[in-house]
Image: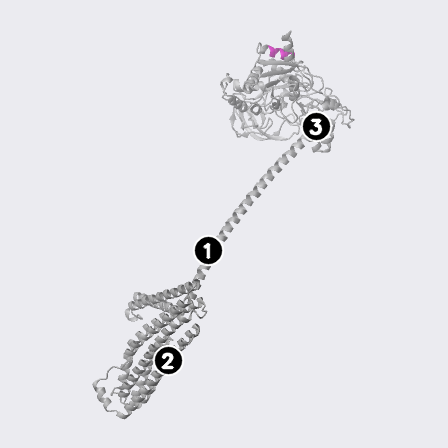
């Protein structure tokens, strides 16, 4: 009793809502065993015979192929197709295929050679010796797809269910009227079907395998039970006949009592379903190594004289199949591929047989009933009562007819299995399934367009992001380049400013020295070029001498630049630091004293150079002939003038001595000291002019004696000037000491005092340079004295000319003497 209860619970069946019971009409074809038909002369093999993309062609026109040789290849949902027989590829071109639209698709045209030779096969009797992935791969390479009518790639379906599948359901219901392909296959090939079920169960590692079959197939049920024997691995479940119990969701609910969720798949509840024809194809692919090249096709209908099930090679034209079973078309004859409820009318009999073609129905005019016209919906709700998917067919019809795609999607039109039960019970003869198919196609087009739009938007946004990144990178590079240019420009500006400051810091003497150095350098380079390219007689000067002069000029220029830098550094240091006013005044006085001392040292050199040479004996004899009275008078006059110049110098020195007694402003004291020095120099110039007048007066006397006396007068005048300079030096020293004592009393600006000190030092260096020039001019002085003597020689016939020559010589001497004094000023 307990065993019976367990058995009852174990074999419990459930029902689904809706469904219909149309006439079965299966007895026309299920009583005849499977048979082979002659091969056609030409096969038309569509590249796409399943759900998914077509594979890549691997043959060309003119190639000879064997049966089972792959014509395309691919991965995933790109299932390959194989040659149904041996022959030659004639062409690859579009052709009308088995589709409700009647559109053309790319096909391979194969001319059969009649030999029907197989390609090399790779059978694997012990499938358990292979890895599961290898088994799935072989199933894919064999091109196996769902042979129940859906055409979903079997390998892809198995990969999706390798984990989590507990129940494997083999669909053997075959519920649609007229179709008996699975019934006849189970009767004739039950062992092969069960072996394919075991392979699928082993790949999926399913806990149980359920074979669901309707009770209107007693012969098939008996054949399966006989083939099973005592095998408990596979369980045969006989279910009541009801349409559409063969639907995937409906059969799952009948056998397990669990409904597939909306928008989901059966694998979501741990269930995977395969057709009995698919199980047979899996067995052939693994055990025998044969790819799918044929399938069982039901040829039935009252327009066929010999209804039966045959082995139909894929790619065989439908007209060839109907011709061999006695097809006698009537007026307005229609041929349906599939069943009367889910099939579609073929646009032409020249369409080829494909993997999902399980039935060719050729009904007579009376068999399909009167073709009544479509009428308006009367809202009887018969369609809703018959719908096995629990939908509202009436609402879906309105939304599909009105193009309201969003509401059609909201009412779950995608859950429609297109079983045709609603159209079968509709009293208004409305072809509801056709409207649903059209609406589904439009929704798929909308989804595809939305997907393409999203992809285009993503590509556009990615491009915009890339362009923005490139723009930012360019701006960064440009900014960096600008910064580099700005830094270089700033460096150039700083360098230019430094050069301008350096040029502004140079004194006129330094610029003159540098200019002379550049001129000497240019002359030296010119002399070198001439020495290389021209003869010695045409050269402007000695190259060696020019080079020496250029070197001397450069040395002077560097010395002057160094002096200028020292002056500027001292001035900057004095300006930056807080200088003691006393020290600044002392330094200024000392600098002025040093300058005067250097000038005084230069004067004796010039005097010795300008002093007349001792008269020769002949000259003394000549001088004795002069009138002693006139000579004495002129000498007295010269001495008086010299004494007058000395007295003026003493007065100047006295005024310089008296000046420090008063409390003078340091600035005024410096100005007065400069004025005193100028007056002393003016007195020396006056003494020189006195000597000149004495020389002019002596021009009327004997030229020799006059020249001697003039030379003596000039020497005395220069001596007086030197005495005046020496007198001014202690005055400057006294002034320096007074400035030292007076500096605290006066409010002296430290910056000005430092500048004055720097100026005083510069003047000292300038005086030293003047002394050097004075010594250089002293070397030329004897030439002037010799000229005087030559002018006074007795060789001169005309006394007037001699006097003029002597005056010219004296003028040259004075000009040479005035150069040092001008430099000091």
SS at mark 3 in the image: helix
Q: Nearer the viewer, residue 86 or 818?
A: 818
SS at mark 2 in the image: helix
SS at mark 1 in the image: helix
Is residue 628 highlighted in magenta?
no
The residue beneath circle 1 is 488
- CA gap between label 1 and label 3 equals 80 Å
Is residue 223 highlighted in magenta?
yes
Does label 3 or label 2 sit earlier along the sequence? 3
Relative to 251, does residue 686 appear above or below in the rendering? below
x and y percentages locating residue 655 in the rendered image: 39, 79
Query: Which of label 3 and label 2 is nearer to you?
Result: 2
- CA gap between label 2 and label 1 equals 64 Å
x and y percentages locating residue 311 in the rendered image: 59, 18
The residue beneath circle 3 is 434
The answer to whether residue 366 is visible is yes
The residue beneath circle 2 is 654
Residue extent of the magenta highlight: 218-225
Does label 2 or label 1 sit earlier along the sequence? 1
x and y percentages locating residue 300 in the rendered image: 66, 18
Q: Quadrant of the N terminus?
A: top right
């Amino acid at each position: 009793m307990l065993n019976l209860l367990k058995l009852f619970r174990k074999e419990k069946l459930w029902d689904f809502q809706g469904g219909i019971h149309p006439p079965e009409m299966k007895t026309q074809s299920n009583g005849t065993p499977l048979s082979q038909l002659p091969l056609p002369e030409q096969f038309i093999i569509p590249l796409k015979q399943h759900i998914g993309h077509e594979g890549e062609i691997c043959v060309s026109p003119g190639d000879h192929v064997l049966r089972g040789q792959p014509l395309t290849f691919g991965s995933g949902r790109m299932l390959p197709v194989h040659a149904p027989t041996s022959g030659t590829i004639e062409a690859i071109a579009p052709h009308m295929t088995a589709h409700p639209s009647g559109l053309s698709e790319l096909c391979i045209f194969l001319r059969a050679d009649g030999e029907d030779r197989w390609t090399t096969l790779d059978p694997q009797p012990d499938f358990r010796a292979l890895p599961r992935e290898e088994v799935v791969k072989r199933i894919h390479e064999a091109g196996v797809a769902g042979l129940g009518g859906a055409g979903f790639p079997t390998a892809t379906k198995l990969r999706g269910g390798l984990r989590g599948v507990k129940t494997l359901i083999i669909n053997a219901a075959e519920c649609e009227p007229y179709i008996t392909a699975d019934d006849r296959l189970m009767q004739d090939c039950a062992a092969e079907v069960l072996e394919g079920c075991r392979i699928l169960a082993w790949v999926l590692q399913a806990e149980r395998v359920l074979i669901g079959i309707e009770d209107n197939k007693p012969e098939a049920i008996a054949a399966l039970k006989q083939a099973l024997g005592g095998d408990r691995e596979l369980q045969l479940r006989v279910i009541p006949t009801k349409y559409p119990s063969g639907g995937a969701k409906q059969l799952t609910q009948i056998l397990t009592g669990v409904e597939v969720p909306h928008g989901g798949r059966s694998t979501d509840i741990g269930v995977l379903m395969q057709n009995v024809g698919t199980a047979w194809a899996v067995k052939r692919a693994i055990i025998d190594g044969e790819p799918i090249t044929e399938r069982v096709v039901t040829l039935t209908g009252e327009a066929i004289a010999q209804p039966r099930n045959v082995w139909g090679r894929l790619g065989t034209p439908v007209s060839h199949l109907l011709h061999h079973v006695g097809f006698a078309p009537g007026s307005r004859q229609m041929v349906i591929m599939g069943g009367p409820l889910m099939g579609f009318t073929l646009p032409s009999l020249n369409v080829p047989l494909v993997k999902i073609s399980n039935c060719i129905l050729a009904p007579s005019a009376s068999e399909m009933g009167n073709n009544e016209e479509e009428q308006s919906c009367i809202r009887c709700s018969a369609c809703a009562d018959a719908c096995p998917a629990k939908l509202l067919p009436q609402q879906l019809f309105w939304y599909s007819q009105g193009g309201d795609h969003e509401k059609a999607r909201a009412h779950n039109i995608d859950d429609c299995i297109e079983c045709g039960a609603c159209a079968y019970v509709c009293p208004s003869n409305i072809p509801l399934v056709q409207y649903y198919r059209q609406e589904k196609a439009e929704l798929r087009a909308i989804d595809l367009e939305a997907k393409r739009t999203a992809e285009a938007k993503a590509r556009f946004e990615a491009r915009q992001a890339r362009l923005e990144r490139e723009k930012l990178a360019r701006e960064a590079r440009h900014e960096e380049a600008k910064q580099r240019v700005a830094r270089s420009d700033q460096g150039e500006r700083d360098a230019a400013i430094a050069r301008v400051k350096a040029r502004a810091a140079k004194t006129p003497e330094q610029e003159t020295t540098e200019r002379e150095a550049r001129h000497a350098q240019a002359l030296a380079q010119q002399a070198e070029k001439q020495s290389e390219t021209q003869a010695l007689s045409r050269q402007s000067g000695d190259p060696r001498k020019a080079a020496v002069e250029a070197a001397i000029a450069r040395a002077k220029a560097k010395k002057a630049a160094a002096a200028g830098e020292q002056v500027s550094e001292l001035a900057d240091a004095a300006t930056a630091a807080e200088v003691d006013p006393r020290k600044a005044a002392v330094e200024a006085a000392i600098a002025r004293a040093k300058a005067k001392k250097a000038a005084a040292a230069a004067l004796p050199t010039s005097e010795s150079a300008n002093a007349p040479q001792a008269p020769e004996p002949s000259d003394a004899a000549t001088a004795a002939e002069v009138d002693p009275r006139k000579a004495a008078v002129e000498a007295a006059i010269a001495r008086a003038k010299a004494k007058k110049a000395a007295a003026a110098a003493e007065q100047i020195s006295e005024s310089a001595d008296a000046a420090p007694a008063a409390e003078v402003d340091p600035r005024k004291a410096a100005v007065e000291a400069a004025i005193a020095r100028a007056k002393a120099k003016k007195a020396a110039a006056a003494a020189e002019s006195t000597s000149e007048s004495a020389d002019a007066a002596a021009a009327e006397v004997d030229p020799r004696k006059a020249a001697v006396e003039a030379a003596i007068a000039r020497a005395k005048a220069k001596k007086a000037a030197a005495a005046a300079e020496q007198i001014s030096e202690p005055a400057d020293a006294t002034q320096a000491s007074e400035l030292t004592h007076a500096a605290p009393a006066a409010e002296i600006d430290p910056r000005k005092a430092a500048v004055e000190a720097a100026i005083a030092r510069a003047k000292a260096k300038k005086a030293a340079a003047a002394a050097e020039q004075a010594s250089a001019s002293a070397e030329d002085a004897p030439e002037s004295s010799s000229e005087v003597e030559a002018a006074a020689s007795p060789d001169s016939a005309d006394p007037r000319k001699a006097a003029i020559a002597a005056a010219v010589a004296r003028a040259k001497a004075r000009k040479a003497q005035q150069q040092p004094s001008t430099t000091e000023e």
